[in-house]
Image: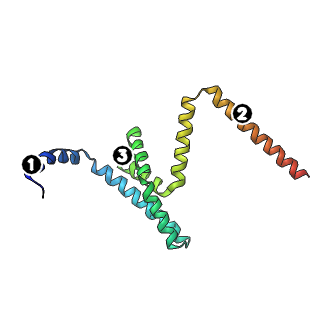
Amino acid sequence: MITASATAKYAPPFVAALAAVDWRLAGGIAFGFAAGWAARAAVQVSKRESSALIWRDLSVSFLISGGCLLLVLLAVDWFGLDELGAAVLSFVFAMGGVKLLEMVHREATEWLRRKFTDVDAVMGERRQEAQKHIAAHKLAKKDEAE
């Protein structure tokens, strides 16, 4: 049972926290995620995939939504997105799933690495990778000729 003193203590900050929430933005984000999950499931249904696979994919989509939500909120803050922009971005992340989240993570990590690593070291790594590709290409041509 909630006592009067607990209500008096916790009600004002709770009401202030509720007032601080942008409900239209939160609704847009929630709608975007729900539409993305539904579209992802619809694509799988149209491909006639098994219901077990669809449910597993949907549960994975739910599980990665926390990370996607953080990225959506970051984009809303950085780019000043409105409700529609937030809904579209939420839809894209929900529809893209794990592969899109992995790609965003890889690109962000690479950007941070380039940002804080000496330019000569980065260029040396790129030259080394280019030489590996050239050598692999030459080897593949050599194998085709034989």
**Mark 3 closeness class: few <14, some 14–19, many ≥20 residues within 10 Å:** few
Query: x, y (%) of residue 135?
Result: 80, 41
Say what secondary structure mark 3 lies in: loop
How has the structure been colored for display?
A: rainbow
Looking at the image, is mark 3 or mark 2 earlier in the sequence?
Answer: 3
Question: Which quadrant of the figure has residue 136?
Answer: top right
- Identify the mark at residue 127; answer none if there is no mark: 2
Could you tell me if the residues under marks 3 and 2 are in contact, i.e. CB atoms within 8 Å?
A: no
Whole-number angstrom distance, CA of label 3 to CA of label 2: 43 Å
Q: Would residue 118 appear left or right of 54 to someone viewing this image?
A: right
Say what secondary structure mark 2 lies in: helix
Determine the residue located farthest toward the left in the rendered image. Answer: 4
Amino acid type at mark 1:
Ser
Q: Would residue 19 appear left or right of 8 to someone viewing this image?
A: right
Question: Which quadrant of the figure has residue 1?
Answer: bottom left
Query: x, y (%) of residue 67?
Result: 43, 49
Whole-number angstrom distance, CA of label 3 to CA of label 1: 40 Å
Amino acid type at mark 3:
Asp
Query: Which residue sits at x=19%, y=47%?
Result: 14
- Identify the mark at residue 5; answer none if there is no mark: 1
- Identify the mark at residue 53; answer none if there is no mark: none
Could you tell me if the residues under marks 2 and 1 are in contact, i.e. CB atoms within 8 Å?
A: no
Say what secondary structure mark 1 lies in: helix
**Residue at numbered disc 3:** 82
Query: x, y (%) of residue 75?
Result: 42, 42
Looking at the image, is mark 3 or mark 1 earlier in the sequence?
Answer: 1
